[in-house]
Image (tube, helix red, strand yellow):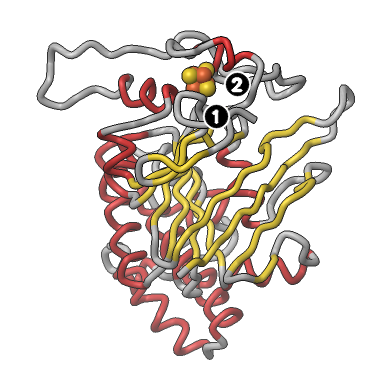
Amino acid sequence: MTLLELDNIVVEFPTRRGPLEAVKGLSLELNEGQILGLVGESGAGKSITGAAITGLIEPPGLIRSGQVRLRGQRIDNLAPEKMRRIRGKEIGAIFQDPLTSLNPVYTVGEQLIDTMRVHLGLDHKAARKRAIDWLAEVGIPAPEARLDQYPHQFSGGMRQRVVIALALCAEPKLIIADEPTTALDVSVQAQILALLKRLCRENGTAVILVTHDMGVIAETADRVAVMYAGRLVEIGDVAQVIQDPLHPYTKGLMNSIPQIGNRDARLTQIEGAMPGLRNPAPGCAFAPRCPQAIDTCRTLRPIPVDAGSGQVACHLFGEAQ
Ligand code: SF4
């Protein structure tokens, strides 16, 4: 069943030199309980997309057009106070730096208890018991004692575990996890991803996992959406996109990942850099870097068409716009 729909959203930031579109007409759907990886290099628009869903676009940035719908209800036009309630109860968020999600002057217990009292209507005693259970669930040793400690008394990995508990304790239907493991040691990353995946599966929570790391997507996601220069270029089931990518940019991303067990394989990089978002050239934004570009690519922008297990926006697969 469809939980979230993004319908042709455009996110714009006014600047002195004119409006800058960071997301340019993005449409996608997410089913209940599904984990969707949103991948692309810096500036592709993936974190802005996450912020648009959670209502956290910093003014004067705004969703210029399009709709964000949660269970069929439009949420992109809600008053800030109403959106704040949805953000706590319906949509949880996990960011790269756990210290941005945790208040340093309250104990982790106070933060968990307050969240559950506000969003689940529990009394203090029940919320405290549930908070201890959540700390145990996310693998914090001696949870009863740790409940009364402050965020600075936890290591980075333990703090991110607390943030996962905080995001899930209000029983949201959707979690936006923006680079949740990028700031952690490699050995801790896998544990945190496995934990997030297990808890979301058990609780039926859908996740949009924003990352630049295809390895993280392969480990965690059911589907993957690849963004480039503010647009969706490919979306499909994770196995198909990773083993048989269709879009030349996705192929480039996959070729730049080391293959375990294949020591002789050379890594290739995608030459060039992503174009600036201001005054985009006509045609496909990837054309200057694309080894398969044809003349049409420089004049006409490709629109997403059905291909593989999802969609791809490339002239090699469909009609030009
Ligand atoms: Fe390459 Fe053309 Fe496809 Fe763009 S539309 S990815 S330039 S082949």
Q: Position of residue 4 (x, y in %)?
A: 55, 62
Classify 211 as above or below 250: below
Disc 1 Cβ-to-ligand 1 distance below 8 Å: no
Mark 1 nearby-residue class (10 Å; few <14, some 14–19, many ≥20): many
Mark 2 nearby-residue class (10 Å; few <14, some 14–19, many ≥20): many
Q: Residue at x 39, y 44 (%)?
A: 236
Classify 268 as above or below 188: above
**Residue wearing tag 1:** 228
* Helix, strand or loop status at disc 2: loop
Q: Amino acid at mark 2?
A: Ala
Classify 204 as above or below 279: below
Q: Earlier in the sequence, mark 2 or mark 1?
A: 1
Q: CA distance from mark 2 to mark 1?
A: 8 Å
Classify 208 as above or below 300: below
Q: Position of residue 113 (x, y in %)?
A: 51, 77
Image quarter in which the N terminus is found = bottom left
Disc 2 Cβ-to-ligand 1 distance below 8 Å: yes
**Residue wearing tag 2:** 285
From the viewer's perspective, tell me whether residue 80 is left or right of residue 286: right
Q: Residue furthest left?
A: 261
Q: Residue at x 35, y 70 (%)?
A: 145
Image quarter in which the C terminus is found = top right
Task: Verify CB contact (< 8 Å) between mark 2 and mark 1.
Answer: yes
Q: Residue at x 45, y 43 (%)?
A: 306
Q: Amino acid at mark 1?
A: Tyr
